[in-house]
Image (cartoon, grey):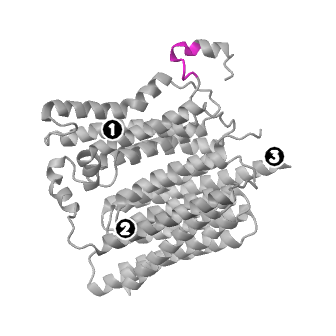
Amino acid sequence: MIDTLAILAIFSGLFFFLSGSIGLLRLPDLFTRLHALAKADNVGLALVALGVIILEPAVINDIKIVIIWLLVMAASAISSHLVARHALRENRNDD
Amino acid sequence: MIELLWSIFDITLVLLLLALAWTTCSTQDVKRAVTLFIAMGLLLAIVWARLKAPDLALAEAVIGAGISGALLLSAIKDYPSNMVSHRSTLIEGIINSLTLVLTILMSWAVWHGLNMSDGVRLSEPVISQLPVSGVSNPVTAVLLNYRAYDTLLELAVVLTAVLTVLTLNEKRVDYEFSSPLLQGMTRWLVPLLVVTSGYLLWVGAHAPGGAFQAGAMLAAAMILLQLAYPSRRQEFNNSLLKILLVIGIFTFLLVGLWMMSLNDDFLAFTPAWAGTLILIIETAATVSIATALTLAYLGGRPRGWEDTNRTSRSIAENGGAG
Amino acid sequence: MISSGASTSILTIALLIALNLLLFSLLIGLFRAWLGPSVEDRFSAILLIGTGGVAMLLILAKLLQITALYDVALVLALLAVVGTVALTQSESNHD
């Protein structure tokens, strides 16, 4: 039962990773691609991390996974912001 | 079924690595090549993890993907978009033939090694001597006890590389603009990086970790600080930097010579003190590696590096503008 | 893991399928590194591989029973943003 929940979480996360990758490939513009990437980063990893937490009995490892999740969320948000702003500034300078 | 799935995973990884390596070397677009190279580094970390080598995975993630990534990206950042690298056909032909010869030689060596029976497996003496080595992680025991001399020379190699960078260039001029969001994140990320670096250093005795990984994390923290707060025209304490650069090798040599006076052999640790000595050496090495990598990233000598005695005077002469 | 033999192997198979699908989605995302007209496009592929790599390391830690891989995932999450900062914040000869 527990395992089923975990597998469900992991495969849901996988769905977001796949859609993020497809979006990265097929969307027309850098900014839309960053948007797709953020879905994979945030929701995809969160669900996979949740699945692994369910499976992992040791508390210290669960704490590490929670820290990883929070870090990736923050890092993904900051990264998208920085890359988008960098692209905007570069475009403005070229005009 | 399980075997099949593992095989699919392994084969896909190998093919992906080969494809990445091929395109990285063959493409003319420099930015594409650098990006694919960094991606290959990340995938290599996954490969090491798959091969049950967490120490290598850790080192690859921190140094190969993290620091090298930052270094390469900073280097190509300002190239024009259509920058290509020109290679003459003759040079390409020579490189290709040499690579082919190397590939054949290595394939033969791997094939030979896989089919070898009854050789002396080094893992047995490593594991059997572990209780007297002072640590319980076999990789750390090999790096800092059985083959400590090699690690000492590795530190010397790192120092030489940094000295080369320092002699060639002055420190890059800082980017003047930084996002407040970035600065806000740096305020908690840098302490986290420092704490993780200390954790990796400490845990290296009984789990994957160690001086190189910890040093690279510390360097990442310093690089982040430097990039997030560029507008302060800070003066580096060059004397301190110089001391930090060499303290790793210095401590290593000191411990080695001390052990030589006690045990008649360079770097022969007395078993009772081995754990403590290794920790001391690793701490000094971490600091040195971090300083070296940070200086290498910064691109060269900070202001006032050459004449430490007359730093204030030279700044006054240049009008402080640098 | 405290489960019967049958459910353990089902779990293992499910995790392996998830691992392969994750690798496949990273493979798709890599095409952006090949194509992407600007360097920011290529870099977003690296961000995807970074987060996907964290997810893969979490699953591998469970599959191979190596708890040290949680440390590797933590480190990868920490360093992902350093690369972004290096790309967007380092020296520029505009401005």
The N terminus of chain B lies in which quarter of the figure?
A: bottom left
Question: Judging from the image, what secondary structure is the residue with disc 2 in?
Answer: helix
Residue tagged 1: B283
Amino acid type at mark 2: Ala
Amino acid type at mark 3: Asn
| Magenta highlight range | B304-312
Pick the residue in front: B198 or B67: B67
State the image coordinates of residue A6 (x, y, percent, origin top left).
41, 76
- Answer above or below: position of C65 versus B75: below
For residue B313, what is the image quadrant? top right
Tag 3 subunit = A
Amino acid type at mark 1: Thr
For residue B21, what is the image quadrant? bottom right
- Rendered residue at 52%/58% (across/down): A72
State the image coordinates of residue B239 (x, y, percent, origin top left).
46, 22
- Rendered residue at 62%/29% (across/down): B232
Are the residues flagged by discs 3 and 1 from a single subunit? no
- Rendered residue at 72%/65% (across/down): A32
Q: Nearer the viewer, mark 1 or mark 2?
A: 2
The C terminus of chain B lies in which quarter of the figure?
A: top right
